[in-house]
Amino acid sequence: MGKFLETIKPYISSEVFLLMIVMGSFLLGVYIYKRTKITLLQPLLISMLIIIPFLKITGIDYQTFCNQTQILNFMLGPSVVALGYVLYEQIEYLKGNVVSILTAVFTGSVVGILSVMLIAKLMGADHILISSLAPKSVTTPIAMSLAEKNGGIPALTAAFVVICGIFGGLVGPIILRRIGIKSKIAQGLAMGSSAHALGTARAMEMGAVEGAISGLAIGIMGIMTALLIPFAERLF
Amino acid sequence: MIKGSFYILLFYFLGEMLSLLMNNFIPGSVLGMILLFLSLFFKVIKPENVKDVAIVITKNMAVFFVPAGVGLMVYAELFSKSLFTILIAIAISTILTIITVSLVQDNFEKRRKKGETNHG
């Protein structure tokens, strides 16, 4: 087994093979997610659960994996830029609600960032962990670049964003019902700004308007959080 | 497709340059997103120019996170050691965010409705 592994190692640590594994495991993740409809089983999570053990068993180190799949990592930047178009598409929902939507998301962003940092600090988290937690409510590529710029660890942030999205997607509709929010705009905004794409997926199930507003909230929340985190970092 | 890729990369580059001018205060990709949005809004570029590419890459965005997500294996110890703190902090903060955002928006709408009935 050991000798066999040595022989095939150059092939399984090649660019082609590793990219294929990423796509394949993600595809399997999409399949499992669609089949089971369990929010916890995100394709990203499933893909990670397949690749991490694979790398551990074959002894391919993370640095090698990262170098070979560089192209995917690069695409995070352009995909954030492309969100500008998605935001533009939802612009009609902004009409007549600009002030309230911006105020609501801004307040939510302040509360979200400060509360997660404060709670983590009170529970004894170190600075790296606090900085990695701060952008948890925004979409992954934005969150990761914010973590990197502000002394956090992007990989940890990616995991926190997924945890936050799953949690927000699950409890969001329950909380909104509890506190008696009937406004479709308020519901969509809350889902998108607290739980990004996963919240938006749930908001889509609530209705088309809620879904579109939630998508809008992802973009605004990303911008607000990017503007606020450098200031919040100075407080902690 | 090529036109769209060009524009996305152009705005990414402009965002990076702006970020440099701002001492990297805000990531270049986020600034690129804002610049693209503003250019579409003020009709500097046509939506059709970026539409195809923008839709393709944002629809399939999650797969781009995989390499970064796998990076968690390097920090597995830190992650599992602080798991309780992480979960509590995220849960409470997420609930507070949901409540804040929805209440602020809801209040704005209620106040406006009241104003409309008073005037009408």
Image: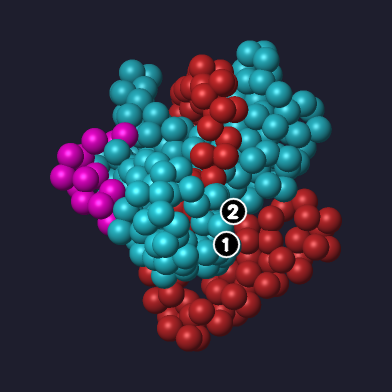
Question: What colour do you see for chain B?
Answer: red
Q: Position of residue B103 (x, y in %)?
A: 47, 27
How many C-alpha atoms fall within 10 Å of the one at disc 1: few (<14), some, or many (≥20)? few
Q: Which residues are magenta?
A: A27-40
What chain letter is assigned to the residue under label 1? A
How many C-alpha atoms fall within 10 Å of the one at disc 2: few (<14), some, or many (≥20)? few
Letter of the cyan chain: A
Identify the element where label 1 is drawn: helix
Q: Is residue A216 visible?
A: no
CA distance for labels 1 and 2: 6 Å
Which residue occupies 65% across, 25% down? A117
Identify the element where label 2 is drawn: helix
Residue A62, relative to residue B118: is it above or below? Answer: below
Which residue occupies 69% across, 55% down? B27
Q: Which residue is the site of mark 1? A: A67
Residue type beneath disc 1: Asn
